[in-house]
């Protein structure tokens, strides 16, 4: 990546993930104190917040001049898996709480940066998305492990 004159300003934006606005349990103790239904809802909220960004991420990776087929394939697979998991969790929520709909998720404002004419801006936006999706998939994985332990194995984990 070439560093332009405004790179310092852009790099300050790296710390912000669009899902940071979603109230989630902060640590293991809070996760374990959260009711299963609420943990399921917050997991759905985090995943829903990725629907639009993942579409743009796939398009941005496809537009990279040196992107390999493997990189594009992995990005598409990530999108498919997250959307599939989201649909499965919505189904579970509808069975646990009939009529419940979880639409509380963070709006993503990052699309203009991915389409910027400035290469540094595009690369930083793509890097930030990758870093944030990694953070959130780890968070979701932890929540699902707790739910599985509680509700499938009766806390015998």
Image: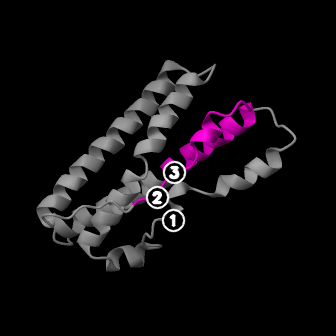
**Label 2 crowd bin: few (<14), some (14–19), many (20+), radius 10 Å:** some
Secondary structure under tag 3 reads: loop
Who's the residue at 74% across and 55% down the image?
A: 12
Percent across and percent down for residue 85 are: 28, 47
Q: What numbered label is drawn on residue 21?
A: 1
Do residues under tags 2 and 3 come within 8 Å of each other at their CB atoms? Answer: yes
Real-space Cα separation, disc 1 to disc 3, in angstroms: 11 Å
Q: Give the range drawn in magenta.
A: 105-134
Quadrant of res 156: bottom left
Q: Is the magenta stretch mostly helix, strand or loop?
A: helix
Q: What numbered label is drawn on residue 33?
A: none
Who's the residue at 30% across and 64% down the image?
A: 41
Do residues under tags 1 and 2 come within 8 Å of each other at their CB atoms? Answer: yes
**Label 1 crowd bin: few (<14), some (14–19), many (20+), radius 10 Å:** few
Real-space Cα separation, disc 1 to disc 2, in angstroms: 6 Å
Q: What numbered label is drawn on residue 106?
A: 2
Q: In this view, does 150 lie to the left or right of 75?
A: left
Percent across and percent down for residue 135 are: 50, 54
Do residues under tags 1 and 3 come within 8 Å of each other at their CB atoms? Answer: no
Note whether residue 125 is visible.
yes
Q: Name the residue under label 3.
A: 108
Q: In this view, does 137 lie to the left or right of 13?
A: left
Secondary structure under tag 2 reads: loop
Q: Earlier in the sequence, mark 1 or mark 3?
A: 1
């Amino acid at each position: 990546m070439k560093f332009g004159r405004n790179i310092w300003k852009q790099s300050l934006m790296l710390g912000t993930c669009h899902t940071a606005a979603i109230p989630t349990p902060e640590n293991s103790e809070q996760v374990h104190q959260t009711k299963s239904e609420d943990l399921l809802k917050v997991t759905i909220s985090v995943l829903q917040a990725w629907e639009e960004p993942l579409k743009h991420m796939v398009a941005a990776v496809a537009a990279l001049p040196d992107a390999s087929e493997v990189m594009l394939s992995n990005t598409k697979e990530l999108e498919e898996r997250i959307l599939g998991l989201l649909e499965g969790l919505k189904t579970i929520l509808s069975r646990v709480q009939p009529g419940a709909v979880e639409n509380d998720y963070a709006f993503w404002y990052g699309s203009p940066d991915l389409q910027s004419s400035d290469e540094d801006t595009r690369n930083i936006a793509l890097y930030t998305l990758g870093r944030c999706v990694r953070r959130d998939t780890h968070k979701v994985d932890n929540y699902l492990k707790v739910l599985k332990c509680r509700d499938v194995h009766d806390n015998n984990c």
